[in-house]
Amino acid sequence: MIDITLPDGTVKSFENNATPMDVAKSISEGFARNVISASFNGTTVETHTPLTTDGALVLYTWNDKEGKKAFWHSSAHILAQALEELYPGVKLSIGPAIENGFYYDVDLGDQTISDKDFKTIEDKMLEIARGKYDFSLRSVSKADALSLYKSQDNEYKVELIENLEDGTITFCDHSTFTDLCRGGHIPNTSIIKAVKVMSVAGAYWRGDEKNKQLTRVYGISFPKQKDLTEYLHLLEEAKKRDHRKLGRELELFTFSAKVGQGLPLWLPKGAALRERLEDFLKKAQKKAGYQMVVTPHIGQKELYVTSGHYEKYGADSFQPILTPNEGEEFLLKPMNCPHHCEIYNAKPFSYKELPIRYAEFGTVYRYEQSGELHGLTRVRGFTQDDAHIFCTPDQLDKEFKDVIDLVLYVFGSLGFENFKAQVSLRDPNTPEKYIGSDENWEKAEAAILNAAIDKGLDYVVETGEAAFYGPKLDFMVKDALGRNWQLGTIQVDYNLPERFDLTYKGSDNELHRPVMIHRAPFGSMERFVAILLEHTGGNFPLWLMPTQAIVLSISEKYEKYAEKVLNVLENNEIRALADNRNETIGKKIREAEMAKIPYMIIVGEQEESKNMISVRQHGGEDLGMISAVDFAEVVEKEVKKTLKTFK
Ligand SMILES: [Zn+2]
Ligand SMILES: [Zn+2]
């Protein structure tokens, strides 16, 4: 008999050679039907692998990341088989599961695949899937593995196998198809009910442009047709909400090849939006005891050698700026922290004055590879909503909680309601990898965990994920399309205070090292605006909207009245415009809808004679005829729904 421990801690005994599927069935037949993959003692196994020792078993369904991985990995085998059948002589190379689906890189010889062929490939894949073939893994000797692929003239698999050790090589068979594979499959092909070939692209063998260019076929598959339909719908939605598209349509930002790749240019409306976000955070930060500082965009190379950033960013980033003075070198700043450390060093501090909190919307520069650049989410120059807190080890607990409050306030005000936190701790088995005393690490880790619990966060702990200089807490937000984004990091740091020799005088009159906290609720203004655009589709919370209302006159006759209404709105601190062009009201409404202006105020004869306005909301809902003052109240109420006062 063997003892199998399940994730909830229960231990069950099974006959030797019981399989993960047997274990699943012992839980319930219904559950077993949904189990598609498994891991045993942390290693991926097949659902029919006989278990021969005691150990910990995790069973995965489609709802688990691991389950999806097995599903898509298995689908890649089927794609490869379909391609072999449809394109005789095709040579397979590699075909992994990816975040959304899978791909296979193939050498088609002189054949090609285009959009027109996708349906044929999908049909072939479904035909194979319906055959209900089991996936079975078998060990092969290196010699046998090589001889199979040499006989197929497949230099790619031969190269892969040559780099493997004899005794570790396995093949996976299903139907008439065999592939080199390490395992991790769903029980059989019939679980795959829907497939879609998404695209084809060129890909160099092993990612090296000196090698031959292969054809990469991207696909995705699902256990239900409904899931595929939903996925395709989400993709469409994501396209509509692409921040690059919305940024252009709403005239928020642009890029210029002349200025340079990855260097965003904020247009007036974008700059106003950004300013509003900054003011919002500045106001909350002021209440939370932060002081604004300003530092230059460059610093002496020596500064970043001291901080360690030169070692990290130096070679792969912007190179030093030279001056007429020989030997003098400056760097574009990759981080604000070194500057803030030197601000702290400008005068001595006593423990009574701590914590000190310096905040800056500091622009930093990092050289991202051109292939990595993407709209506002990956740029070469960006502004962090940065702050550094210098405190005593005993103050860490409270400071950390206060930072969490601020981050949650930011999320709440911007409509991110769905988020998780990740607490990254050090690996206690390798203390030599971390700097700082054990005592301080224990204090900091306890402070973060306490804060997470105290604030009721939904969090996971990742042991061994801490930076070498301190533990941290990251927030992951889920957007309206269910995609996860990392936002808001709070990081404890023992390293920089050491490197910059930061001190404070303690109650014992001795000098001590402060602890430093880095934090940025938005992360960067660029990335945050991008995520906010994709989350809201450009319909920001009302308090943030560049234009909250637009007055549309039905004809020129009502221009004067429209101006009067505009005046009332402006006096009530509503950001409004008037559209008095000689255009039809229908056209004016359409354009205001396109610009996503939340309220359209229509004024004509009736409105003027009654001294009222007709209000239409973005999306079509009518609020009827009300007075401008009543409307101002509606706006104020709506603003307060998301924008609360901090503390
Ligand atoms: Zn496989
Ligand atoms: Zn920092």
Image (tube, rainbow, N blue to C red):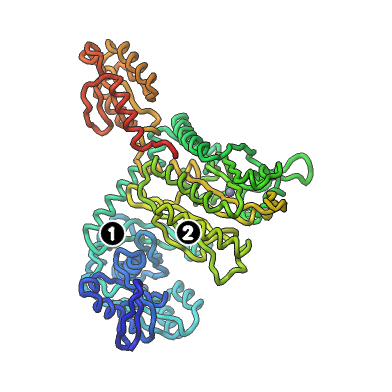
Q: Position of residue 327 (x, y in %)?
A: 77, 46
Numbered disc 1: secondary structure: strand
Q: Is residue 356 above or below residue 578?
A: below
Please state, as top left, top right, bottom left or bottom right, where the N terminus lies in the image. Answer: bottom left
Packing grade of label 1 (10 A; few <14, some 14-19, many >=20) is many
Marks 2, 1: nearer the viewer = 2
**Amino acid type, label 2:** Leu
Q: Position of residue 606 (x, y in %)?
A: 20, 14
**Amino acid type, label 1:** Lys
**Residue that carries the numbered disc 2 in the rendered image:** 449
Lower sequence index among marks 2 and 1? 1
Name the quadrant containing residue 381.
top right
Please state, as top left, top right, bottom left or bottom right, where the C terminus lies in the image. Answer: top left
Numbered disc 2: secondary structure: helix
**Residue that carries the numbered disc 1 in the rendered image:** 196
Q: Position of residue 330 (x, y in %)?
A: 70, 44
Using residue 101 as the reference point, say whether residue 507 is left or right of it: right
The residue at the point 49 percent across, 47 percent down is 402
Q: Position of residue 532 (x, y in %)?
A: 40, 42
Packing grade of label 2 (10 A; few <14, some 14-19, many >=20) is many
**Within 8 Å: ligand 2 and the Cβ of disc 2?**
no
**Within 8 Å: ligand 1 and the Cβ of disc 1?**
no
| Residue 255 visible in the current orientation | no
- The residue lying toward the viewer, choosing from 87 and 14, is 14
Mark 2 and mark 1 residues within 8 Å of each other at the beta carbon: no
Using residue 251 as the reference point, say whether residue 481 is left or right of it: left
